[in-house]
Amino acid sequence: MKYFFIPLTILLFACSDNKTVKVKGSDTEVNLAVQLAESFHRYKPSLFISVSGGGSGLGIASLLNGNADIANASRRINEKEMALFREKGIVLDSFIFAQDAIAFIVADDLPLASISTRQLADLLSGKVRNWEPIAGKRLPVNIYGRQSNSGTHDFVKNRLHISFSPAAKQMNGNAQILEAIRADHSGIGYVGAGYVIHGVTKGIKVLPVYTTDRNAAVSPLDAAKIAEGAYFFQRPLFQYFRAKDSLQVRPFIAFEKSPEGQKIINVGGYYPAKK
Amino acid sequence: MGIRKRERIDWLMKLVFKSTGLLTIALLAGIFFMLLYNSMSFFFDVPPIDFFTGSQWDPDNSKNAYSILPLLVSTGLVALGSMMIAVPLGILSAAFLSELAPGKLQAVLKPVIEMLAAIPSVAIGFLGITLVGPGIARIFGIENGLNALNGSILLAVMSLPTIITISEDAIHAIPKSYREASLALGANQWQTLYRVVIPAAYPGLIAAVLLGLGRALGETMTVLMATGNTAEMPSGFLDSIRTITATIAIEMGEVPYRTTHYFALFAIAAVLFLITLLINLVGEYAANRLRKFQA
């Protein structure tokens, strides 16, 4: 019952001001969107941008029921959601504003320099439950992942064609995963690269990933390789909006595309969208 | 005021009071039937026997992995653990508060304990991640502290104010003559407390424990943050768990509308509802019985 008030307050705030563009969705994109919104506000103080997270699915659902003007999504909108929009007669427009890379992190004292996609699939699906065959150290594997309402969760799952091990812990967000890996010497987790580039990275290690050739392992922190599209776990970050609102949201999106916006994206640990 | 007017007001007031009373029953029945109705749709798709006997809750990846068992065990484990900590702690502090504490200390302690109930569950969950979790990991020499024990400790903290406040009232309500009689027969203060006062307060203490248990069973945010949320069957207090409430909170936001998975969440909610209902009924029965025994 006590959670009942939260949507109510949001609703009240939503009604009070119609010069606000509400951005909702992916937790991966929330930091970046906040930075973009802050700089944009300095650049054009008359338009307010409010940014909140909650997951890609939530963002798209909010766009559908009118609680958001822009939905951040770290995955492409799926058929089911598309059908709901069609049912309501809403035409969607989208735009890719950055490239995100998923970093796989372990504690820095784990004797492992890089990891293959096959090893990752074995670990995350729960087929291999000990680090011994992979890192040569007898330790049970602890998986730290996201909850099933996270776009990152879906992305990793679909990219590796696995279903996650039932022993995988489901954490609330990227920061919690980092915190957990730092404390846990046997942990493996996945977070957006933005979180490891500018966050405190003491005690953790980002693993370069390869598919077949160990020497060709690519780190998610390597901007040049990301620009080539060579990293296995990279993905475009989408922003969806209602086509009829394009006048209202256009200034913000134009700002994101501008050199200034692209610079913020770079500094934020993401990579500019591939042209 | 004419007699007719008075009677009319009287009649109106009776109606108002009756309807407010009945409204509560209607709400309870409404919630129950809503849960039951949606659960029915689930049980058309998945036979109840699979629901209660399987060992895997994993609707995202498998079509038939709808077993409540790991969730039920998780919920039971964390609630049991929290009661093992909170019941002795709560009842003993209540006894101390009402029987032994000097007046000044009592005047400070009571409001402070009640303030404990005002801490939001998110803040307690945060404490579990940053403080209790690493502490447990260090003490037990394991790699991480996001497990049932962590959840139990946090839930114990959250149910303590309920247990202490109600127990204290129950102990306080024991007539002074009981204590005087006991002391007059030569029992010392300690013997009076645990042989006379606490047994006499049993009905109230049971109510306190059951209300605390209800809080522990229904709490969502704290366990969601601090217990790791693994859908695997737990084998002990040092395993990560995922409770019924956390499962509903995590999956309700994303589940496609009116699918088997959606109805499955209603089914587990209905099971949780029945458990809390049963606990309340048992508590009521026990309390009434013991009360008769005393009189």
Image: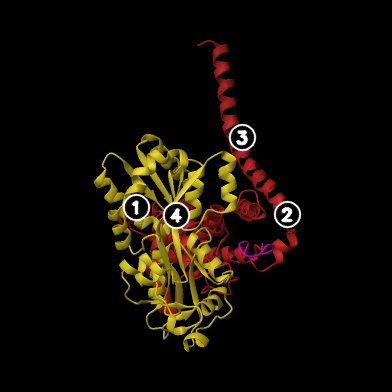
Residue drawn at (24%, 47%) of the image: A42
Residue density around tag 1, few if under 14, some if 14–19, many if 20 or more, within 10 Å: some
Q: Which element type, helix, strand or loop, lies under badge 3? A: helix
Q: Disc 4 designates what residue?
A: A238
Which mark is in front, 3 or 4?
A: 4
Q: Disc 3 designates what residue?
A: B22
Contact flag, marks 3 and 1 (Cβ < 8 Å): no
Amino acid, disc 2: Phe
Amino acid, disc 3: Leu
Contact flag, marks 2 and 3 (Cβ < 8 Å): no
Which mark is in front, 4 or 1?
A: 1
Label 3 lies in what chain?
B
Q: Is B150 or B86 nearer to us in this picture?
A: B150
Asked if the magenta segment contains residue B62, the reply would be: yes
Amino acid, disc 1: Lys
Q: Disc 1 designates what residue?
A: A257
Please state the horizontal and vertical placement of residue B93, each as a whole percent of the image: 42, 61
Q: In the rendered image of this protein, does residue B40 appear above or below residue B136?
A: above
Give the mark nearest the N terminus, 2 or 3: 3
Q: Disc 2 designates what residue?
A: B43
Q: How many marks?
A: 4
Label 1 lies in what chain?
A
Q: In the rendered image of this protein, does residue A43 appear above or below residue A105?
A: above
